[in-house]
Image (cartoon, helix red, strand yellow):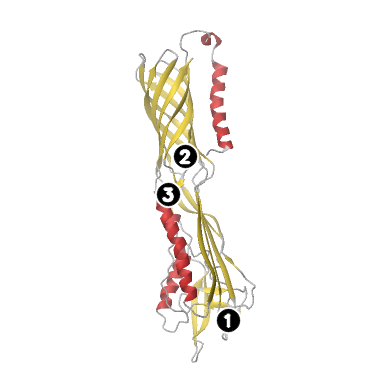
Amino acid sequence: MCTSRTRARLCTAIAACLISLATVVPPARAQTNAPGKWEVELHGGGLLSSNPTAGSVSLPGPGAAFTTAGLYPPPAPPVIVVATSRYESSWYFGDGALLFNQAATALAANPVAMTGAFSGRMVALDPVLGSALGGWGRTGNIGARVGRVLTPRLAAEPSVAYGLARPQITPADRDPIEATRARFIAAFNGLITSNPGRVLKNLTSTATLDDGSAHQLFTSGTIVINLMTSGRIIPYATIGASLNSIVGTMPSVTLAGNYQFQNASGSQMNESDNVTVSDARAGNSVAGILGGGVKYQISPRWGIRIDARVSLSKNSGGTVLDAAPNVVLGTLPAGRIALNADPTIQFGNSAGPVTSLGVTSVAPSSLTGPAIADLGTWSGSGVSSHGNIAAGLFWRF
């Protein structure tokens, strides 16, 4: 449904065209029966927009590395294990998903690990980050045109058209989003419950998809070239330029994960993983127009018009990423957990060093990488096209 602001913009554009006519029509011409040099038209039709996939991908790099240590196994003889981990902004994509899977694989090969091998692995959201999130389908459009005859062969024609449908998150993105959401549950359930000393208290992973409220608005100016200058049927060609605008919000998806568990020592872990991916294509783009059609003159003043045109513009698609990890700190007793693997994953509930089993180590979780805001992960390239076929009724005066 169009918003009130969108309807106002469309009405304003049409009103401006009509007002311009009223101010320039010569009074003498308006009082005669002969057709004038002006035309006004209302039309409707179909709109088909392309969804180009070409572009450049730029995902976040690996998180900063840190070293941690653990004492395994608790019975004698103890073994001190020193391993590296990385600070991650999320487990859902990029290096966070990679670290989780690396640690899980290394853990399975360790014969003295306190955490047993588990099968759960993360499925990274990377394919979604490296493509356009939203896409336009086939839709209807309505609009208005104003024409001014320059010569029997040429006419100038400003116009405005409004696409009726909203974009949608593409099926090619919906399946990977669901796979990432679901595998978060399987991966962390396996990691946490693979040690019988841990008590799982909460594990959730949700995906909220929002198709947005956007519509397309095309404001164009063209030259009409009549291929015939007399008769009831007038075929013509058009050439010109258009400003293609997006009004409203584009699609986005938010993934939210949380795991809470109690370690064997009694320490409580509570960590949240929040990621939002948004379609960030440019709100305005300039396009060239090519097309043609035919007019059928019912009378010297009235007629029917069939018009087909395509606008070609630079692909202005883009995808941006936000990530906001949250680790609850300050709960007692203070504690940390590092998997007996290299690389490892560490969980912690204290900002400072924690001594456990005689080993002192930094305590922050691996999920304490920096927050990410409006990071572009995909930028479109190539050409975007919008095909428009419309039928309308025109009045000449």
Q: Position of residue 366 (x, y in %)?
A: 53, 70
Q: Secondary structure at mark 1?
A: loop
Q: Which residue is mark 2?
A: 165
Q: Residues within 10 Å of mark 3 (few under 14, many from 20)?
A: some
Q: Is 93 or 138 nearer to us in this picture?
A: 138
Do labels 3 and 1 touch, CB within 8 Å?
Answer: no
Q: Residues within 10 Å of mark 1 (few under 14, many from 20)?
A: some
Q: Does 218 sit above or below residue 79?
A: above
Q: Does 321 sit above or below residue 103?
A: above
Q: Is 198 or 148 nearer to us in this picture?
A: 198
Q: Residues within 10 Å of mark 2 (few under 14, many from 20)?
A: some
Report whether 374 appears left or right of 120. right
Which three-letter amino acid code belongs to the residue tagged 1? Ser
Which three-letter amino acid code belongs to the residue tagged 3? Thr
Q: Does 322 sit above or below residue 76?
A: above
Q: CA distance from mark 2 to mark 1?
A: 56 Å
Q: Secondary structure at mark 3?
A: loop
Any part of residue 323 in sight: yes
Q: Please name the residue shown 57% across and 22% down the image.
A: 19
Q: Position of residue 225 (x, y in %)?
A: 39, 22
Residue 265's disc is 1
Mark 3 or 1, nearer chain start: 3
Q: CA distance from mark 3 to mark 1?
A: 46 Å
Figure quadrant of residue 174: bottom left
Residue 170's disc is 3
